[in-house]
Image: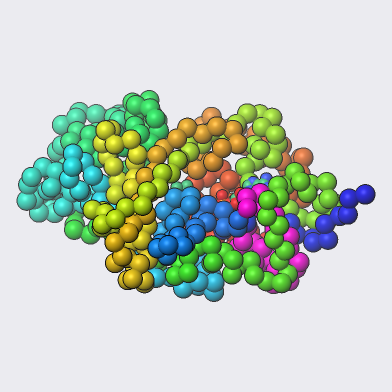
Amino acid sequence: MKSMIAQKYIVVGAGLFGATVAERLSRKHQVLVIEKRAHIAGNVYSHFDPETGIEVHDFGSHIFHTEFDEVYEYLSNFTEFNDYIHTVNTRHAGKLYPMPINLDTINLLYGTDLSAEEAEKFVKEEAEKTGIKDPKNFEEKGLSLVGEKLYTAFLKNYTKKQWNTDPKNLDAAILSRIPVRYSHNNRYFIDAKYQGIPKEGYTKMVENMLSSENIEVRLNTTFKDIESSISPDATVIYTGPVDELLDYKFGVLPYRSLRFEEERVENSDQKEAVINEADLDVPYTRTHNYKYYQVHRPEIVDQPTSILCHEYPADFEQGGEAYYPVNNDESEALYQKYLAEVKTAYPNLVLGGRLGAYRYWDMDVCVKTALALSRTL
Ligand SMILES: Cc1cc2nc3c(=O)[nH]c(=O)nc-3n(C[C@H](O)[C@H](O)[C@H](O)COP(=O)(O)OP(=O)(O)OC[C@H]3O[C@@H](n4cnc5c(N)ncnc54)[C@H](O)[C@@H]3O)c2cc1C
């Protein structure tokens, strides 16, 4: 006979959400964390390249940023953050432009020297010129917000690549606003009170979160592997996809996926962490030069070698890597159907994490939500 799992709390998924809940619970309880991958840290997992010491973000570039004191203070128990400040340039027709659009972006694109007030009036006039009052799709919304030239340069083709469809086929609601700054401020996360990269890397931060002797971590283990050994009075915190949990009985929740291609380059021209690629002739959407995140390690930044990573948008298939949920009325209805079914099928299971919630969450929202949930358990 199979022996039952002794722990009262079982956390499925060793990502940031699962690690936060496990760490909080471990103050008072024994916790079992199971993880289907061969490593902890979920999508914030990174490793250090042994030759160069460069931190490679295996599931895409991650920059910690938050306005929440609670989250910053909590994570600071497990890592120190460096002083990296995120800025992004977008390449269009061979030239680099600050993103989000600011005064410099506008003047560079139009070849003008407008002041902040002049630029604001100018963009408003450009938007009005399109004559679109009631935008019916993404493209019309974009045009109605910033006018033809800014939209075509920075949004049209980038969006086409991201979604693999013409922006005319996308919902107008996807684009609630386009941030345009009438100043020279080029900080990507303009509202972030705190930002930075864990000095010893993301994986080490999560390892520290899971280091309590009250936590047992089992890698290469799926929920289905242990399901029959869970005692009826145990509580399961499940941070995986809800459609998979229920064997996709109502269909697959839609996502967009990504594919990453890395190359080792000597003396790269890219002297910054991220460049967005706005044009269609470049098939990827972003190029990451990881070493520029390690601002606390000048010997890493200053070495001639870079590890560049090209990020390609990709279609998602059942069981593949789910990155960005495609949230619309249809997928929300499907998600709600799964939620109702989970309540009946698994009364002792609490859904959590970005996959369980079927939402895009930045790391800080993920940790904040996990802290709030932990207080209720
Ligand atoms: C490309 C990209 C870039 C991002 N960049 C940033 C950024 O710069 N800044 C920022 O703040 N946020 C960023 N994020 C968001 C960040 O990745 C998430 O907030 C965070 O990873 C969510 O953690 P999680 O624990 O909810 O999910 P995950 O990290 O996905 O963890 C879930 C874990 O559960 C495991 N699991 C799933 N199902 C099962 C099962 N059945 N059995 C066992 N284990 C299972 C998975 O293997 C995984 O390890 C980015 C996201 C993406 C997609």
Residue visible at 37% across and 45% down in the picture: 310
- Tell me the magenta residue range: 17-38
| Residue 24: in magenta span | yes
The one of 320 and 87 positioned closer to us in this rendering: 320
Q: In the figure, 200 relative to 121: above or below?
A: below
From this view, report whether residue 241 is shown above or below residue 272. above
Question: Which image quadrant: the C terminus?
Answer: bottom right
Place of residue 148 in the rendered image (x, y in percent of width and height, measured from the top left): 19, 33
Q: Which residue does the image show at 53% across and 67% down from the upper left?
A: 205
Left or right, 112 with respect to 263, comes to left
Residue sitting nearer the eye, 197 or 243:
197
**Which residue is located at x 63 percent, y 28 percent?**
251
Q: Where is residue 93 in the image (x, y as percent from the top left)?
A: 18, 39
Front-most of residues 89 and 188: 89
Can residue 365 be seen here?
Answer: no
Q: Position of residue 126 (x, y in %)?
A: 15, 37
Answer above or below: position of 293 versus 239: below
Horizontal side, residue 34 vs residue 274: left or right: right
Name the foreground residue: 91 vs 180.
Answer: 91
Asked whether residue 81 is drawn in magenta, I would say no
Residue 66, picture quadrant: bottom left
Residue 216 is situated, as x and y percent measured from the top left of the image, at 72, 63
The residue at the far right in this view is 1
Number of labels in the image equals: 0
Residue 269 appears in view? yes
Residue at x 46% of width, y 62% of height: 50
375 sits to left or right of 123: right
Color encoding of the figure: rainbow
